[in-house]
Amino acid sequence: MANKERLRQHLETMSKFTATPNEGMTRYSYSPEDVKTRTYIKEKMEQYGLTVSEDGLGNIFGKLEGTKESAPSVLIGSHFDSVPHGGNYDGPAGIMAGLEVAALFQEYGIKPAYPLEVIALIEEEGSRFGGGLMGSRGINGLITDEEFHTILDKDGISVIEAMQEAGLDSSLPKHRDPKTMKAFLELHIEQGPVLEEENITIGVVDAIVGLTQFEVTVEGKAGHAGTTPMGRRSDALITAATIVSELPKLAIDEGNGTVITTGQFAVFPNGSNVIPDKVVFSIDLRSGEDVSIQRVMEKVQALIESHQKDGIQTSIEQQLYIKPKELSEEIRSYLKESTEKLGISSIPMLSGAGHDAMVFSDYTEAGMIFIPSKDGLSHCPEEWSSLEHLAKGVDILFETAKKLTEAE
Ligand code: HGY
Ligand code: MN
Ligand code: MN
Protein backbone atom coordinates (compact mmCIF):
# COMPACT_ATOMS: atom_id res chain seq x y z
CA MET A 1 0.00 0.00 0.00
CA ALA A 2 1.11 3.59 -0.59
CA ASN A 3 3.68 4.94 1.86
CA LYS A 4 2.30 8.17 3.28
CA GLU A 5 5.70 9.26 4.58
CA ARG A 6 7.16 9.23 1.07
CA LEU A 7 4.13 11.16 -0.19
CA ARG A 8 4.49 13.67 2.64
CA GLN A 9 8.15 14.20 1.77
CA HIS A 10 7.31 14.83 -1.91
CA LEU A 11 4.58 17.28 -0.96
CA GLU A 12 6.64 19.19 1.62
CA THR A 13 9.69 19.38 -0.65
CA MET A 14 7.95 20.41 -3.88
CA SER A 15 5.72 22.91 -2.07
CA LYS A 16 8.83 24.89 -1.18
CA PHE A 17 9.74 25.50 -4.86
CA THR A 18 7.55 28.56 -5.44
CA ALA A 19 8.38 32.11 -6.60
CA THR A 20 5.77 33.48 -4.17
CA PRO A 21 6.44 31.91 -0.74
CA ASN A 22 3.49 32.35 1.70
CA GLU A 23 1.37 33.54 -1.22
CA GLY A 24 0.66 30.24 -2.95
CA MET A 25 2.44 28.23 -5.60
CA THR A 26 3.89 30.14 -8.54
CA ARG A 27 6.06 27.84 -10.63
CA TYR A 28 6.44 28.75 -14.29
CA SER A 29 8.03 26.44 -16.82
CA TYR A 30 11.84 26.67 -17.01
CA SER A 31 11.92 29.06 -14.03
CA PRO A 32 14.37 28.55 -11.13
CA GLU A 33 11.44 26.93 -9.29
CA ASP A 34 10.97 24.53 -12.20
CA VAL A 35 14.64 23.59 -12.10
CA LYS A 36 14.56 22.87 -8.34
CA THR A 37 11.42 20.75 -8.77
CA ARG A 38 12.79 18.87 -11.77
CA THR A 39 16.01 18.13 -9.91
CA TYR A 40 14.02 16.67 -7.02
CA ILE A 41 11.76 14.60 -9.31
CA LYS A 42 14.76 13.17 -11.18
CA GLU A 43 16.53 12.31 -7.91
CA LYS A 44 13.47 10.40 -6.73
CA MET A 45 13.10 8.63 -10.06
CA GLU A 46 16.70 7.40 -9.77
CA GLN A 47 16.16 6.40 -6.13
CA TYR A 48 13.21 4.23 -7.23
CA GLY A 49 15.33 2.45 -9.84
CA LEU A 50 14.03 4.32 -12.90
CA THR A 51 16.09 5.33 -15.93
CA VAL A 52 15.71 9.11 -16.19
CA SER A 53 15.47 11.13 -19.41
CA GLU A 54 14.13 14.46 -20.62
CA ASP A 55 12.74 15.31 -24.05
CA GLY A 56 13.31 18.42 -26.17
CA LEU A 57 10.66 20.32 -24.19
CA GLY A 58 11.91 19.43 -20.74
CA ASN A 59 9.23 16.82 -20.04
CA ILE A 60 10.77 14.30 -17.61
CA PHE A 61 10.49 10.49 -17.92
CA GLY A 62 11.49 7.84 -15.39
CA LYS A 63 11.37 4.36 -16.95
CA LEU A 64 11.24 0.91 -15.37
CA GLU A 65 12.08 -1.43 -18.25
CA GLY A 66 9.74 -4.31 -18.99
CA THR A 67 10.62 -7.91 -19.81
CA LYS A 68 8.83 -7.75 -23.20
CA GLU A 69 11.17 -6.68 -26.01
CA SER A 70 10.54 -3.03 -27.12
CA ALA A 71 7.00 -2.99 -25.66
CA PRO A 72 5.00 0.23 -25.25
CA SER A 73 5.00 1.89 -21.81
CA VAL A 74 2.31 2.57 -19.27
CA LEU A 75 2.78 6.24 -18.40
CA ILE A 76 1.72 7.65 -15.02
CA GLY A 77 2.05 11.32 -14.15
CA SER A 78 0.87 14.88 -14.57
CA HIS A 79 2.28 18.43 -14.82
CA PHE A 80 4.50 20.41 -12.44
CA ASP A 81 3.94 23.97 -13.57
CA SER A 82 1.31 26.11 -11.81
CA VAL A 83 -0.99 29.06 -12.21
CA PRO A 84 0.12 32.28 -10.49
CA HIS A 85 -0.47 32.02 -6.71
CA GLY A 86 -1.98 28.57 -7.13
CA GLY A 87 -1.93 25.52 -4.89
CA ASN A 88 0.48 22.70 -4.07
CA TYR A 89 -1.57 19.82 -5.47
CA ASP A 90 -2.74 20.79 -8.99
CA GLY A 91 -0.35 18.71 -11.07
CA PRO A 92 2.23 17.60 -8.49
CA ALA A 93 -0.30 15.26 -6.82
CA GLY A 94 -0.25 13.23 -10.04
CA ILE A 95 3.53 13.20 -10.19
CA MET A 96 3.77 12.16 -6.54
CA ALA A 97 1.33 9.36 -7.34
CA GLY A 98 3.47 8.19 -10.26
CA LEU A 99 6.63 8.30 -8.12
CA GLU A 100 4.91 6.31 -5.37
CA VAL A 101 3.65 3.66 -7.80
CA ALA A 102 7.23 3.28 -9.02
CA ALA A 103 8.47 3.04 -5.42
CA LEU A 104 5.89 0.29 -4.78
CA PHE A 105 7.00 -1.60 -7.90
CA GLN A 106 10.56 -1.41 -6.53
CA GLU A 107 9.51 -2.35 -2.97
CA TYR A 108 7.56 -5.40 -4.14
CA GLY A 109 10.25 -6.33 -6.70
CA ILE A 110 7.69 -6.28 -9.53
CA LYS A 111 9.26 -6.97 -12.95
CA PRO A 112 6.62 -5.75 -15.40
CA ALA A 113 6.21 -7.19 -18.88
CA TYR A 114 5.38 -3.71 -20.23
CA PRO A 115 7.56 -0.81 -19.08
CA LEU A 116 6.26 1.59 -16.45
CA GLU A 117 7.12 5.27 -17.01
CA VAL A 118 6.61 8.09 -14.55
CA ILE A 119 6.11 11.34 -16.48
CA ALA A 120 6.35 14.97 -15.33
CA LEU A 121 4.98 17.44 -17.87
CA ILE A 122 5.80 21.09 -18.46
CA GLU A 123 3.48 24.04 -19.19
CA GLU A 124 0.07 22.43 -18.77
CA GLU A 125 -1.38 25.64 -17.33
CA GLY A 126 -0.03 27.95 -20.02
CA SER A 127 0.82 30.49 -17.31
CA ARG A 128 4.11 31.44 -19.00
CA PHE A 129 3.53 30.82 -22.70
CA GLY A 130 -0.28 30.94 -23.01
CA GLY A 131 -2.58 28.26 -24.42
CA GLY A 132 -1.63 25.41 -22.13
CA LEU A 133 -1.18 21.62 -22.41
CA MET A 134 2.13 22.41 -24.10
CA GLY A 135 4.08 19.45 -22.70
CA SER A 136 1.50 16.85 -23.73
CA ARG A 137 0.72 18.58 -27.05
CA GLY A 138 4.45 18.71 -27.81
CA ILE A 139 4.95 14.99 -27.06
CA ASN A 140 2.04 14.13 -29.34
CA GLY A 141 3.27 16.27 -32.23
CA LEU A 142 0.55 18.95 -32.04
CA ILE A 143 3.01 21.85 -31.92
CA THR A 144 5.62 22.35 -34.66
CA ASP A 145 9.32 22.81 -33.88
CA GLU A 146 9.06 26.26 -35.50
CA GLU A 147 6.34 27.34 -33.04
CA PHE A 148 8.66 26.68 -30.11
CA HIS A 149 10.82 29.47 -31.52
CA THR A 150 7.87 31.85 -32.04
CA ILE A 151 5.76 31.22 -28.92
CA LEU A 152 6.95 33.95 -26.54
CA ASP A 153 6.33 34.72 -22.89
CA LYS A 154 5.32 38.24 -21.78
CA ASP A 155 9.00 39.28 -21.78
CA GLY A 156 9.42 38.17 -25.39
CA ILE A 157 11.44 35.06 -24.48
CA SER A 158 10.72 32.02 -26.68
CA VAL A 159 10.19 28.49 -25.38
CA ILE A 160 13.56 27.46 -26.83
CA GLU A 161 15.39 30.44 -25.28
CA ALA A 162 13.74 29.81 -21.90
CA MET A 163 14.77 26.14 -22.02
CA GLN A 164 18.37 27.07 -22.84
CA GLU A 165 18.45 29.61 -20.00
CA ALA A 166 17.32 26.80 -17.67
CA GLY A 167 20.13 24.57 -18.93
CA LEU A 168 17.82 22.18 -20.81
CA ASP A 169 18.64 20.62 -24.18
CA SER A 170 15.99 21.84 -26.63
CA SER A 171 17.64 19.89 -29.46
CA LEU A 172 16.40 16.55 -28.05
CA PRO A 173 13.39 14.98 -29.79
CA LYS A 174 10.04 16.52 -28.77
CA HIS A 175 7.59 14.26 -30.57
CA ARG A 176 7.09 10.71 -29.26
CA ASP A 177 5.83 7.86 -31.42
CA PRO A 178 2.36 6.88 -30.11
CA LYS A 179 3.38 3.23 -30.64
CA THR A 180 5.69 3.62 -27.62
CA MET A 181 2.71 4.31 -25.33
CA LYS A 182 0.32 1.60 -24.07
CA ALA A 183 -1.62 3.82 -21.66
CA PHE A 184 -1.54 7.16 -19.82
CA LEU A 185 -2.83 7.34 -16.23
CA GLU A 186 -3.27 10.60 -14.32
CA LEU A 187 -4.30 11.21 -10.72
CA HIS A 188 -5.49 14.78 -10.21
CA ILE A 189 -7.28 16.78 -7.54
CA GLU A 190 -10.96 17.28 -8.41
CA GLN A 191 -10.73 21.08 -8.17
CA GLY A 192 -14.45 21.12 -7.39
CA PRO A 193 -16.80 20.28 -4.46
CA VAL A 194 -18.56 17.07 -5.57
CA LEU A 195 -16.43 14.31 -4.00
CA GLU A 196 -16.17 16.12 -0.67
CA GLU A 197 -19.89 16.96 -0.54
CA GLU A 198 -20.90 13.41 -1.43
CA ASN A 199 -18.22 11.96 0.88
CA ILE A 200 -16.78 9.86 -1.98
CA THR A 201 -13.05 9.14 -2.12
CA ILE A 202 -12.42 8.76 -5.85
CA GLY A 203 -13.83 10.19 -9.08
CA VAL A 204 -13.28 8.00 -12.14
CA VAL A 205 -13.23 10.52 -15.00
CA ASP A 206 -15.51 9.61 -17.93
CA ALA A 207 -14.90 12.73 -19.99
CA ILE A 208 -13.22 16.13 -19.99
CA VAL A 209 -14.85 19.34 -21.21
CA GLY A 210 -13.65 20.96 -24.39
CA LEU A 211 -11.95 24.31 -24.06
CA THR A 212 -10.71 27.19 -26.12
CA GLN A 213 -8.62 30.18 -25.12
CA PHE A 214 -8.28 33.53 -26.87
CA GLU A 215 -6.18 36.63 -26.53
CA VAL A 216 -8.16 39.78 -27.44
CA THR A 217 -6.52 43.11 -28.27
CA VAL A 218 -8.47 46.38 -28.21
CA GLU A 219 -6.69 49.47 -29.55
CA GLY A 220 -7.80 53.08 -29.26
CA LYS A 221 -6.00 56.37 -28.83
CA ALA A 222 -3.90 57.51 -25.90
CA GLY A 223 -4.65 61.00 -24.59
CA HIS A 224 -4.58 63.35 -21.65
CA ALA A 225 -7.17 62.46 -19.00
CA GLY A 226 -7.76 66.12 -18.26
CA THR A 227 -7.76 67.90 -21.57
CA THR A 228 -9.51 65.37 -23.84
CA PRO A 229 -13.28 65.99 -24.00
CA MET A 230 -15.42 62.88 -23.37
CA GLY A 231 -16.86 63.04 -26.88
CA ARG A 232 -13.42 62.93 -28.53
CA ARG A 233 -12.01 59.78 -26.98
CA SER A 234 -11.22 56.32 -28.34
CA ASP A 235 -10.77 54.72 -24.94
CA ALA A 236 -9.54 51.12 -25.32
CA LEU A 237 -10.33 50.27 -21.71
CA ILE A 238 -13.98 51.31 -21.84
CA THR A 239 -14.51 49.18 -24.95
CA ALA A 240 -12.62 46.19 -23.48
CA ALA A 241 -14.53 46.41 -20.20
CA THR A 242 -17.84 46.61 -22.09
CA ILE A 243 -16.96 43.48 -24.12
CA VAL A 244 -15.89 41.54 -21.00
CA SER A 245 -19.09 42.53 -19.19
CA GLU A 246 -21.17 41.07 -22.06
CA LEU A 247 -19.39 37.65 -22.14
CA PRO A 248 -21.08 35.87 -19.17
CA LYS A 249 -24.55 36.22 -20.73
CA LEU A 250 -23.36 34.37 -23.85
CA ALA A 251 -22.39 31.34 -21.72
CA ILE A 252 -25.51 31.51 -19.52
CA ASP A 253 -27.83 31.72 -22.54
CA GLU A 254 -26.01 28.76 -24.17
CA GLY A 255 -26.45 26.47 -21.13
CA ASN A 256 -24.95 22.93 -21.39
CA GLY A 257 -22.68 23.85 -18.49
CA THR A 258 -20.90 26.36 -20.72
CA VAL A 259 -18.55 28.67 -18.80
CA ILE A 260 -16.58 31.72 -19.87
CA THR A 261 -13.87 33.57 -17.96
CA THR A 262 -11.58 36.55 -18.39
CA GLY A 263 -8.62 36.00 -16.10
CA GLN A 264 -6.04 38.32 -17.64
CA PHE A 265 -6.61 42.02 -18.38
CA ALA A 266 -3.61 44.23 -19.21
CA VAL A 267 -3.97 47.99 -19.71
CA PHE A 268 -1.45 50.10 -21.67
CA PRO A 269 0.22 52.47 -21.00
CA ASN A 270 -1.39 51.98 -17.58
CA GLY A 271 -1.11 55.55 -16.31
CA SER A 272 -3.86 56.89 -14.03
CA ASN A 273 -4.00 60.18 -16.00
CA VAL A 274 -3.68 58.62 -19.47
CA ILE A 275 -6.57 57.46 -21.66
CA PRO A 276 -5.62 53.81 -22.39
CA ASP A 277 -4.71 53.17 -26.02
CA LYS A 278 -4.49 49.38 -25.69
CA VAL A 279 -5.98 46.57 -23.63
CA VAL A 280 -5.06 42.89 -24.01
CA PHE A 281 -7.33 40.40 -22.25
CA SER A 282 -7.93 36.63 -22.17
CA ILE A 283 -11.09 34.61 -22.79
CA ASP A 284 -11.36 31.03 -21.55
CA LEU A 285 -14.46 29.23 -22.91
CA ARG A 286 -15.48 25.66 -21.98
CA SER A 287 -18.33 23.22 -22.40
CA GLY A 288 -19.04 19.50 -22.31
CA GLU A 289 -20.65 19.95 -25.74
CA ASP A 290 -18.50 20.97 -28.70
CA VAL A 291 -21.51 22.49 -30.48
CA SER A 292 -21.87 24.91 -27.56
CA ILE A 293 -18.24 25.93 -27.77
CA GLN A 294 -18.64 26.57 -31.50
CA ARG A 295 -21.85 28.59 -31.06
CA VAL A 296 -20.48 30.77 -28.27
CA MET A 297 -17.17 31.18 -30.11
CA GLU A 298 -19.05 32.67 -33.07
CA LYS A 299 -20.97 35.05 -30.80
CA VAL A 300 -17.75 36.14 -29.07
CA GLN A 301 -16.10 36.91 -32.40
CA ALA A 302 -19.19 38.86 -33.59
CA LEU A 303 -19.33 40.79 -30.29
CA ILE A 304 -15.67 41.80 -30.56
CA GLU A 305 -16.03 42.84 -34.20
CA SER A 306 -19.16 44.90 -33.38
CA HIS A 307 -17.06 47.18 -31.16
CA GLN A 308 -14.73 48.07 -34.05
CA LYS A 309 -15.86 51.71 -34.51
CA ASP A 310 -15.17 55.33 -33.40
CA GLY A 311 -11.43 54.91 -33.66
CA ILE A 312 -11.36 51.54 -31.88
CA GLN A 313 -9.63 48.53 -33.50
CA THR A 314 -10.21 45.00 -32.16
CA SER A 315 -8.47 41.68 -32.89
CA ILE A 316 -8.72 38.15 -31.49
CA GLU A 317 -6.12 35.36 -31.51
CA GLN A 318 -7.08 31.76 -30.68
CA GLN A 319 -4.34 30.21 -28.51
CA LEU A 320 -5.85 26.79 -27.84
CA TYR A 321 -8.83 24.77 -28.97
CA ILE A 322 -9.43 21.21 -27.84
CA LYS A 323 -12.68 19.31 -28.21
CA PRO A 324 -14.44 17.56 -25.31
CA LYS A 325 -12.78 14.19 -24.80
CA GLU A 326 -14.15 10.86 -23.63
CA LEU A 327 -11.51 8.81 -21.80
CA SER A 328 -10.72 5.15 -22.48
CA GLU A 329 -13.53 2.71 -21.65
CA GLU A 330 -10.92 0.01 -20.98
CA ILE A 331 -8.95 2.12 -18.51
CA ARG A 332 -12.11 3.40 -16.82
CA SER A 333 -13.17 -0.19 -16.22
CA TYR A 334 -9.74 -1.13 -14.82
CA LEU A 335 -9.83 1.88 -12.50
CA LYS A 336 -13.37 1.01 -11.38
CA GLU A 337 -12.37 -2.63 -10.79
CA SER A 338 -9.43 -1.43 -8.68
CA THR A 339 -11.67 0.76 -6.53
CA GLU A 340 -14.01 -2.21 -5.97
CA LYS A 341 -11.13 -4.60 -5.24
CA LEU A 342 -9.78 -2.16 -2.63
CA GLY A 343 -13.19 -1.24 -1.26
CA ILE A 344 -12.73 2.46 -2.03
CA SER A 345 -15.85 4.51 -2.82
CA SER A 346 -15.97 6.05 -6.30
CA ILE A 347 -18.29 7.74 -8.77
CA PRO A 348 -17.97 8.49 -12.50
CA MET A 349 -17.30 12.20 -13.19
CA LEU A 350 -17.06 14.82 -15.93
CA SER A 351 -14.02 17.08 -15.58
CA GLY A 352 -14.68 20.82 -15.87
CA ALA A 353 -10.93 21.39 -15.81
CA GLY A 354 -8.68 20.61 -18.74
CA HIS A 355 -5.92 18.03 -18.27
CA ASP A 356 -3.01 16.46 -20.16
CA ALA A 357 -5.04 13.22 -20.24
CA MET A 358 -7.33 14.85 -22.80
CA VAL A 359 -4.38 15.26 -25.17
CA PHE A 360 -2.99 11.76 -24.61
CA SER A 361 -6.49 10.28 -25.13
CA ASP A 362 -6.14 10.80 -28.91
CA TYR A 363 -2.88 8.81 -29.02
CA THR A 364 -3.15 6.11 -26.38
CA GLU A 365 -5.57 4.65 -23.81
CA ALA A 366 -5.92 7.47 -21.26
CA GLY A 367 -7.59 7.38 -17.85
CA MET A 368 -7.90 9.72 -14.86
CA ILE A 369 -8.94 9.59 -11.26
CA PHE A 370 -9.79 12.52 -8.99
CA ILE A 371 -9.26 12.85 -5.27
CA PRO A 372 -11.36 15.30 -3.20
CA SER A 373 -10.45 18.99 -2.95
CA LYS A 374 -11.12 20.67 0.40
CA ASP A 375 -14.04 23.11 -0.03
CA GLY A 376 -13.76 22.42 -3.77
CA LEU A 377 -11.01 25.04 -4.01
CA SER A 378 -8.18 25.09 -6.54
CA HIS A 379 -6.00 27.59 -8.46
CA CYS A 380 -5.53 29.38 -5.14
CA PRO A 381 -3.25 29.05 -2.08
CA GLU A 382 -6.08 27.39 -0.11
CA GLU A 383 -5.97 24.35 -2.45
CA TRP A 384 -5.64 21.24 -0.26
CA SER A 385 -6.21 17.49 -0.41
CA SER A 386 -5.57 14.88 2.28
CA LEU A 387 -2.63 12.49 2.21
CA GLU A 388 -5.17 9.81 3.09
CA HIS A 389 -7.06 10.37 -0.14
CA LEU A 390 -3.84 10.74 -2.12
CA ALA A 391 -2.61 7.40 -0.73
CA LYS A 392 -5.91 5.72 -1.71
CA GLY A 393 -5.58 7.15 -5.19
CA VAL A 394 -2.07 5.75 -5.40
CA ASP A 395 -3.30 2.31 -4.34
CA ILE A 396 -5.82 2.38 -7.18
CA LEU A 397 -3.19 3.43 -9.72
CA PHE A 398 -0.83 0.76 -8.37
CA GLU A 399 -3.47 -1.97 -8.91
CA THR A 400 -4.28 -0.61 -12.36
CA ALA A 401 -0.62 -0.24 -13.36
CA LYS A 402 0.11 -3.83 -12.30
CA LYS A 403 -2.74 -5.03 -14.50
CA LEU A 404 -1.71 -2.89 -17.48
CA THR A 405 1.99 -3.82 -17.28
CA GLU A 406 1.56 -7.56 -16.72
CA ALA A 407 2.00 -10.01 -19.61
CA GLU A 408 -1.23 -10.72 -21.52
O1 HGY B 1 -7.38 25.37 -16.81
C1 HGY B 1 -7.46 24.18 -16.53
O2 HGY B 1 -8.51 23.59 -16.62
C2 HGY B 1 -6.25 23.45 -16.06
O3 HGY B 1 -6.02 23.77 -14.75
N1 HGY B 1 -5.10 23.80 -16.87
MN1 MN C 1 -4.71 23.85 -13.12
MN1 MN D 1 -3.82 20.50 -13.42
Image (cartoon, rainbow, N blue to C red):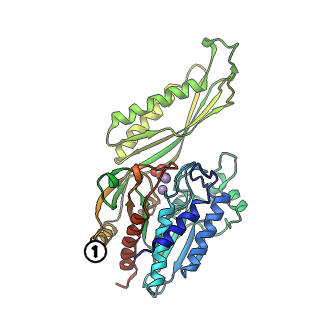
- The x, y position of residue 379, in whole percent, is 49, 49
Residue bearing the label numbered 1: 341
Name above or below for residue 157 compared with residue 401: above
Q: Residue at x 46, y 39 (%)?
A: 261
Task: Identify the element where label 1 is drawn.
Answer: helix
**23 left or right of 273?**
left
Q: Residue at x 57, y 53 (%)?
A: 25
Name above or below for residue 240 compared with residue 334: above
**334 left or right of 240?**
left
Q: Residue at x 55, y 50 (%)?
A: 83
The answer to which of 128 and 1 lies nearer the viewer is: 1
Name above or below for residue 273 compared with residue 107: above
Name above or below for residue 82 compared with residue 293: below
Q: Amino acid at mark 1?
A: Lys
Residue 185, visible in the rendered structure: yes
- The x, y position of residue 406, in whole percent, is 38, 83
Residue 179, visible in the rendered structure: no
Determine which quarter of the picture holds residue 183: bottom left
- The x, y position of residue 371, in whole percent, is 39, 60
